[in-house]
Structure formats: structure tokens, C-alpha cells
Image (tube, rainbow, N blue to C red):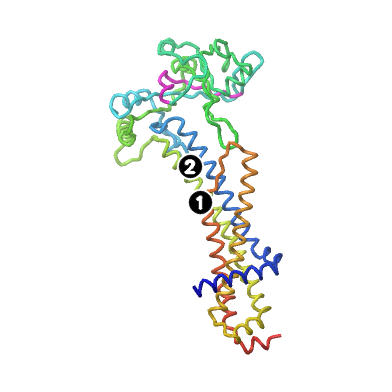
């Protein structure tokens, strides 16, 4: 009880001291304030950005498997061996369908390079349309929702009919007043009949549209007729419920055998799932957060040095006070506790101000970017508060020890 009373008294004395030197105290903890503000704001924004990415990826379904010859997320330049991997073939799809019992749906597709090409309807145009050839079962594998019209059939695919479905953004751009179904459009100079439009997907954190909203989906064999040289396939598979891990193993073994990969070599293809894509993004988030922690640590160090400096000045200014307290019975640990508590309180106030300012910044970010769910994670708050208190404890120890070590007689004589 006596120790608790002493702590409360020290905290009260600390606030009195800080109030007497408010401007100097604020300048002292400015580095801590900036460090906390930086960490909390960046952590909240990245947390919101990550959640948006998770929501977008999960729209394909948690049992989805994405297969392609190149990495889905590439940090740094791609090696020559990776660039020269051979494309996936329809034979690979048939092998998966035949030898992977844990796979429910497997469907290939191709994406046409339409660089400097256009899609047109009357006076409306879209530059570089995202033209993709898929099979009818893509509507189930990719969890697509039809907004208007219908998806194309097996017969339309087999007969290479020039029909197309428009993503939500593509439909809005070419048909701002609606009524896309049944209209004739030109894509790369070829005429297609619009038979359906797709529901809009969840957008990105900064208000940008999902790339799936800008697609032009045509039957696979139709595009192979129009673009016979295109054979760089992507494959979308869906595992049966509860069998995703087994499906990944089966697909890996089948593709390694199908593509004749030696047992000592790595895969010459990439498998991605909702979880693995999120993990790849998390690596980027972690690297960004590491940089932010480094910058915030610099702020904490600057603030800590400022705290040590101002507390050393305080010890010199209050030498007679220290001598008087010792003369009336204060012990070394009492003086040590008083100055240490002052340093911790000073830094903690800087941390709390940083937290409050960060919440204000996030409120403004929410107004500017309503699609970005920037919420402060609890670990960021704990780091900010605990880090600022730790800085006060560490950098305030030396001034507090110096104050506690003063000789009372010499301190009373100090002018």
C-alpha cells in the first residue's frame, strides 16, 4: 500500500512538473509522437488494404486452385529459366480431370493480348479490352454471377460462335444506359453478340475496380479460331469440400509427370490458392511494416535522447530540491522512482497523443477512401503505448540514477 501511494504521488508530481514546462515537454516527446503516429497509421492502412485483398481473392472461392506457368506475385526480376517455362496445354487439363479425384472442376482459358486494340459500340470505346477465352464451366469455377442475360453454352463453344459476356465495368463503359444484351460490338475489329453481363465484384481499397469487372468473356474455341497462335493457358480448378490439400498434391504430381519434370528439379509451373496468394501479399505487407518499424524506431530513439537530455537538465535545475528531499528523509529509491516516473509519464503522454492523432488521420482517410477499411489492429496500439513507455523507462534511467546519487549536503549548497 505504501509503494502504491508513493507511485501515485510520483505520478502527480510528474504531471505537475510537465504542466510547468508544457511546451518544452511537447518538444521533448515530438519524436515519440511522430513514431507512434507513423506506426499506427501505416499499420491501420495496411490492415485495411490486406482485408480488401483477402475479400477480392476469396470471391473466387476458398477451394479454388489457380495454375499458371509464371509466379502470381513476383518480387524482383524474373529469372530466364522461369521466363522460358513452356505454356500449359489442354492435355494438362485433361490429365488433371482424369487423375485427380479430389478436383471437382478444372477449366482452362486464354487471355488475348489486345495492346493498342479497342472494343467499340457505336460512339463508345474501350482501349486495351481484357479479352479472355474460357469454357462454359468457368462460370462455376470462378463463382461468377450473371447480372443480365446468360452464359454461353457448350454448343456455342464447340461451334465457335462469336458471342461474349461483359464484366460490369465493360458493360457500363460501352452501354452507359444499359441494354447490352443482344447488341453487336466490335472487339479488335471482330464482331461479337453480347449475350450477358456479369455482376460487379467488390472493388479495391482505393476505389479501383476489380479486374474481373473489365473482362470480355468469349467461348474458348471462338478465340482459338480468331487467334490460332495463342496457346498460353491458365487453369482454374476447384477442389471438393475439405480436400484442398489433397487436391494440391494430386495436381502437383500429375503436372510434374505430364510436363516431365525430373524428380530433382523444382516445379516448372505455379499453384496458387486463396491462402497462398494472401500469404504472398502478407510478405509484402511484412516488408513494408519492417521499414515502418525501422523509421518509428528512429523516432523513438530521437525522442528518447531528447527525454534523457531534458531530464539531465531537470536534475541540474532541481538539485536543491533533491537535496532538500533527501535532508527530510527521502531515500535513493524515492528520488530514483520520482524521476523515472516523470520520464515514463512524459513518453507515455507522447504515445497517447500519437495514438489520438493517428485515429484522427484514419478518420480523414476513411472520408477520402470509404472502400478502405482502415482499422487499427490491437497489436499496433499495444506497440505504440508499450514502446513509448519503454523509451521513457530506458532513457530516463540514467538521469534518475544521477539524481538519486546526489550528495544531500552538496545539493543544498548548489546555486
On screen, 137 above or below 357?
above
**Of 171 and 253, the residue lying toward us:** 171
On screen, 247 above or below 329?
above
**Of 350 and 203, the residue lying toward us:** 350
- In the picture, measured across the screen, residue 69 lies left or right of residue 315, that is left
What span is in magenta? 127-141
Residue 183: which numbered mark, if any? none
Quadrant for the C terminus, please: bottom right
Q: Residue at x 49, y 17 (%)?
A: 218
Q: Residue at x 31, y 25 (%)?
A: 95
On screen, 220 above or below 7?
above
Q: Residue at x 63, y 16 (%)?
A: 177
Spot occupied by residue 37 in the image (x, y as percentages of width and height): 61, 54
- Mark closer to the observer (1, 2): 1
On screen, 129 above or below 159?
below
Q: Which residue is mark 1?
A: 378
Secondary structure state at the residue bearing disc 1: helix
Q: Which residue is mark 2?
A: 281
**Of 167 and 162, the residue lying toward us:** 167
Pick whichever of labels 1 and 2 is earlier in the sequence.
2
Secondary structure state at the residue bearing disc 2: helix
Instruction: Bin the neighbour count of mark 1 within 10 Å (Cα to Cα): few under 14, some 14-19, many 20 and up.
Output: few
Q: Quadrant of residue 83?
A: top left
Amino acid at each position: 500500500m505504501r509503494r502504491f501511494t508513493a507511485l501515485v504521488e510520483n505520478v502527480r508530481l510528474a504531471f505537475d512538473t510537465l504542466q510547468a514546462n508544457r511546451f518544452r515537454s511537447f518538444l521533448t516527446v515530438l519524436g515519440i509522437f511522430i513514431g507512434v503516429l507513423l506506426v499506427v497509421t501505416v499499420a491501420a492502412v495496411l490492415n485495411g488494404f490486406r482485408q480488401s485483398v483477402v475479400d477480392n481473392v476469396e470471391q473466387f472461392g476458398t477451394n479454388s486452385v489457380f495454375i499458371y506457368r509464371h509466379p502470381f506475385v513476383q518480387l524482383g526480376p524474373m529469372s530466364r529459366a522461369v521466363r522460358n517455362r513452356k505454356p500449359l496445354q489442354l492435355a494438362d487439363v485433361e490429365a488433371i480431370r482424369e487423375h485427380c479425384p479430389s478436383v471437382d472442376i478444372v477449366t482452362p482459358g486464354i487471355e488475348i493480348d489486345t495492346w493498342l486494340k479497342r472494343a467499340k459500340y457505336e460512339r463508345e470505346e474501350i482501349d486495351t479490352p481484357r479479352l479472355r477465352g474460357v469454357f462454359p464451366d468457368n462460370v462455376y469455377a470462378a463463382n461468377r454471377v450473371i447480372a443480365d442475360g446468360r452464359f454461353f453454352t457448350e454448343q456455342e463453344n464447340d461451334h465457335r460462335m462469336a458471342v461474349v459476356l461483359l464484366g460490369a465495368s465493360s458493360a457500363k463503359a460501352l452501354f452507359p444506359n444499359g441494354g447490352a444484351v443482344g447488341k453487336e460490338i466490335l472487339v479488335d475489329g471482330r464482331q461479337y453478340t453480347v449475350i450477358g453481363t456479369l455482376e460487379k465484384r467488390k472493388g479495391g481499397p482505393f476505389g479501383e475496380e476489380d479486374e474481373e469487372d473489365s473482362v470480355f468473356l468469349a467461348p474458348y474455341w471462338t478465340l482459338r479460331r480468331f487467334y490460332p497462335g495463342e496457346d498460353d493457358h491458365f487453369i482454374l480448378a476447384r477442389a471438393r469440400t475439405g480436400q484442398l490439400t489433397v487436391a494440391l498434391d494430386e495436381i502437383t504430381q500429375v503436372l510434374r509427370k505430364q510436363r516431365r519434370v525430373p524428380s530433382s528439379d523444382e516445379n516448372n509451373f505455379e499453384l496458387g490458392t486463396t491462402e497462398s496468394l494472401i500469404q504472398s501479399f502478407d510478405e509484402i505487407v511484412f516488408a513494408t511494416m519492417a521499414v515502418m518499424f525501422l523509421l518509428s524506431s528512429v523516432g523513438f530513439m530521437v525522442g528518447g535522447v531528447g527525454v534523457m537530455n531534458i531530464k539531465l537538465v531537470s536534475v541540474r535545475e532541481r538539485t536543491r530540491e533533491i537535496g532538500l528531499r533527501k535532508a527530510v528523509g527521502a531515500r535513493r529509491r524515492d528520488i530514483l522512482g520520482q524521476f523515472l516516473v516523470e520520464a515514463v509519464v512524459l513518453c507515455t503522454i507522447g504515445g497517447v497523443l500519437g495514438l489520438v492523432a493517428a485515429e484522427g488521420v484514419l478518420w480523414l482517410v476513411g472520408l477520402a477512401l470509404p472502400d478502405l477499411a482502415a482499422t487499427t489492429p490491437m497489436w499496433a496500439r499495444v506497440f505504440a503505448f508499450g514502446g513509448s513507455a519503454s523509451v521513457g523507462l530506458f532513457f530516463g534511467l540514467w538521469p534518475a540514477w544521477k539524481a538519486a546519487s546526489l550528495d544531500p549536503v552538496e545539493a543544498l549548497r548548489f546555486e
